[in-house]
Image: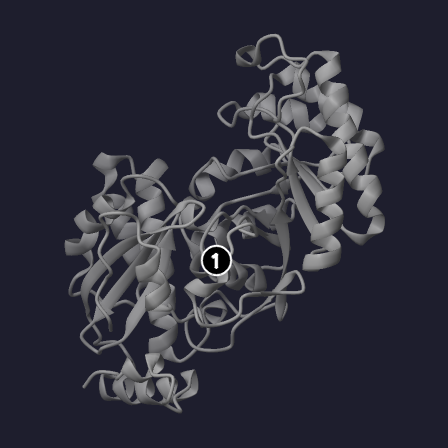
Amino acid sequence: MGVDYSRLHDPNAEYTMRDLSAETMGVTRERGGGRDVEITDVQTTMVDGNFPWTLVRIYTDAGIVGTGEAYWGAGAPELIERMKPFLQGENPLDIDRLTEHLVQKMSGEGSIGGVTVTAISGIEVALHDLAGKILEVPAYQLLGGKYRDEVRVYCDCHTEAEADPIACADEAERVVEELGYDALKFDLDVPSGHEKDRANRHLREPEIEHKASIVEAVTERVGSRADVAFDCHWSFSAGSAKRLAKRLEEYDVWWLEDPVPPENHDVQREVTQSTTTPITVGENVYRNHGQRRLLEEQAVDIIAPDMPKVGGMRETRKIADLADMYYVPVAMHNVASPVATVASAHVGAAISNALAVEYHSYELGWWADLIEETVIEDGSIEIPEEPGLGVTLDMDAVAEHLVDGEELFDEA
């Protein structure tokens, strides 16, 4: 017996997620509480958003389907297809075991970092959605319950004139006043007109002053109405990063993100410990092992894992637990569709040290159309109480925005 999902897409049907829950409960009771549910298929499709989002679906012989998302990037769908045989016939409730099994089986593809971890992350998120539906609990419950009912969102902001301090300040005020966000981020690795050679990562004093003028204009314009972070995209040398961070100490900077390249933890530690400007790092390292030295050596003030890239929901929980041992908060990097954004919010609800989840798509008018539920309201995400992630893909919207050459995955 399978669950009839067709009514979910029938606008005339009086059918809710609670009805789905009741019907699913009948299936899982019949199947011993879900212990004999088996994975039958794994499919992907790519949506052409502001990044190419890789959506993942896991199908079962109970007719229950889980939806996830992998961080954008070429190669993830092909890797997920190769992992399918390692999942078929398995019980989807064994999330940790299956995830570690994939890491081991894909070791030849470098499964401790890069796109292989990203591909595994997409499967892991889908497993949380699937397990939540089988067990009739929201995904945050699988992570240990929740600390909060809603998670704060910070809006990654852009302007056509990103190097113009006044244009940045104008956009900051607009996003606060018109869109309702009280947390923002702007880029600082923008041309100043004073560069001699950007390849050597060195910042001349006029360049530092230009960046300081952006920070001053934005932070003074929004004042206490919003926290503002600034992203450097690991563009600067160690000495330049120290000088820039020192120059920004007089301003109310929420954090300065990735001022130096991510590989050398010793340099990262030196930069962080040289300034009172909070330093944030984490999106470019993988799994909790990748984040370990950053935390143990106090090389970061705020850790910023990207959940659908770093290893998935439970892996991000592990990173947060490690960070909590060093009293470090977590601000999740996120450039995803609504699927992984909501999944990140579930993680944010379940960890004590969550600061915020990033929203990187405010200029993409149809972002919210990809799922049927509302995601962001008044600068925050209310955590769904429905089973799994609590999101329903709008298949028409998915089909409309497919990457060229992609095919829509099967309906449930």
The residue at the point 28 percent across, 35 percent down is 110
Question: Residue 193's x, y, as percent?
Answer: 66, 16
- Residue 90 lies left or right of residue 275; in this view the side is left
Question: Residue 170's x, y, as percent?
Answer: 75, 43
Image: 116 above or below 57:
above
Which residue, as the protein is rendered here, is positioned at the far top?
196
Quadrant occupied by the C terminus: bottom left
Image: 229 above or below 164:
below
Name the colouring of the figure: one colour
Quadrant occupied by the N terminus: bottom left
- Residue 87 visible in the displayed image: yes
Q: Amino acid at mark 1?
A: Trp
Q: Quadrant of residue 298?
A: top right
Q: Nearer the viewer, residue 387 or 135?
A: 387
Q: Quadrant of residue 340?
A: bottom left
The residue at the point 22 percent across, 75 percent down is 37
The residue at the point 73 percent across, 54 percent down is 176
Q: Which residue is mark 1?
A: 367
Instruction: Describe the element under mark 1 as helix, strand or loop.
Output: helix
Q: Quadrant of residue 244?
A: top right
